[in-house]
Each structure stands twice: as structure tokens, then as C-alpha cells.
Image (cartoon, grey):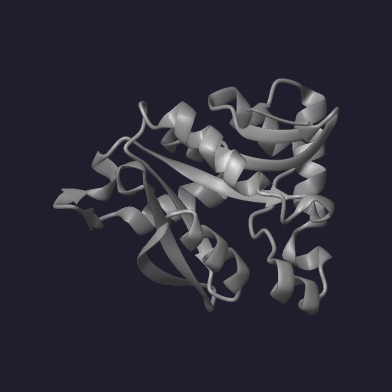
Amino acid sequence: MYTTKFISSDNELRQVAELSRLNSAESLTEDVKAEQGYVSWKYTFEDLKALHEIAPSAIIKDGDKVIGYLLVLVKESATVYAPLKEALNLFDGQVYKGKMLMDYNVYFLGQTCIDSNYRGRGLLRQLYQFHKDNFESVYDFALSSIARDNPKSMIVHARLGFRTLFPFTDGGKEWDIVIWDFNLG
């Protein structure tokens, strides 16, 4: 039985940090990255602890083992996590449905990952449903960025209802900003 919940302990934060490290682009072969995807942003335990104090993130567990996560970053998270601060600059001047993007009540998906031994079981969809159930009444939508050289992630997120808002380039790498608008399904 898998349990989806918000992170509630340092042990869970440590397990998320380790799962993030194991699935980072630097830790995987090119074949694995192409076939299964990878995570782009790096989070230490200290990063996660500081972010968790601002907004809790969701995990999925098999017993005591964290087997997946979906990180929540809110605008205030930029005060403790530099990559988000840099990313927020991308949204200056962006319009969505006739309104400045950052005038909406929005949160950011820091990244998501399911342990490779548990993939293909619908757990990612379960994590996203948990997010929708808990955040749909609080936020207008969620935003994330996906590297264009991570097609597996693009396909999975499109299936979950994400839509591309706009592309950008950072350090020569191409990305897409994607939106998960709760009102679109």
C-alpha cells in the first residue's frame, strides 16, 4: 500500500535529497536519461529543510521508504533557494489569459521523481492528484520548467495536463516553462 502525504520529518527530507541525487543528470547514464528522464535542480537536505519551512512538499511512501516526491516552491521560497530566484526573472512581463503571470496566485513545482524501482505504477499521477486535491482551492495553477533534452518528462507532463507556455534558454540549454492550470483538467 502506497501512502501519499506531505513531508513531516527530517528523515523524509533526507530520503528526498537522496532520491534527487540518485536521479540527477550527473548520476545517470545517457541511455537512462533518454529512456527514463532525470531531475535538473539539485537539492541538499539543508535546501529542502529551508524550503519545507516555507511550504511543505508531497511524497509517496512504501512503508517507511520515500519512493517519490513532488516539491512545492512558492514565491517566498526564492529567498532561500537561488535557482528559483533566477527562474522568477523569466516570468517578468509574461501574460496568461490577459493578466500578468505573476499576478496570479501561483506555486512552482521544484521537480518530481519516482524511484526507478516503482515507475510505471501510476504513482506520479497519484502524487499530482494529491497536489490538485490540496492546492486547487488555494492556487490558480502550478508552473514548472522542463529541459528540452528530457523528452520523457515532457511526454509524461503533457499526459498529466501540462501545457507549454513559453521556451527559454539558460546557459545554452533549451527549456520550456509549462503550466498546470487546474481549470483545464
Left or right: residue 19 compared with residue 111 = right
Between 91 and 118, the one lying in front of the other is 118
Residue 127 picture quarter: top right
Between 129 and 6, the one lying in front of the other is 129
Residue lying furthest top in this view?
Answer: 8
Give coordinates of residue 136: x percent, y percent. 39, 32
Above or below, 84 relative to 157: above
Give coordinates of residue 178: x percent, y percent. 42, 59
Identify the residue shown where x is 75% and y is 42%: 44
Residue 120 picture quarter: bottom right
- Quadrant where the N terminus lies? top right
Give coordinates of residue 69: x percent, y percent. 67, 41
Between 25 and 59, the one lying in front of the other is 59
Can residue 79 be seen at all in this image of the molecule? no
Residue lying furthest left in this view?
Answer: 98
Identify the residue shown where x is 70% and y is 20%: 8
Identify the residue shown where x is 82% and y is 27%: 11
Between 46 and 57, the one lying in front of the other is 57
Identify the residue shown where x is 59% and y is 76%: 149
Give coordinates of residue 60: x percent, y percent. 71, 35
Above or below, 99 relative to 154: above
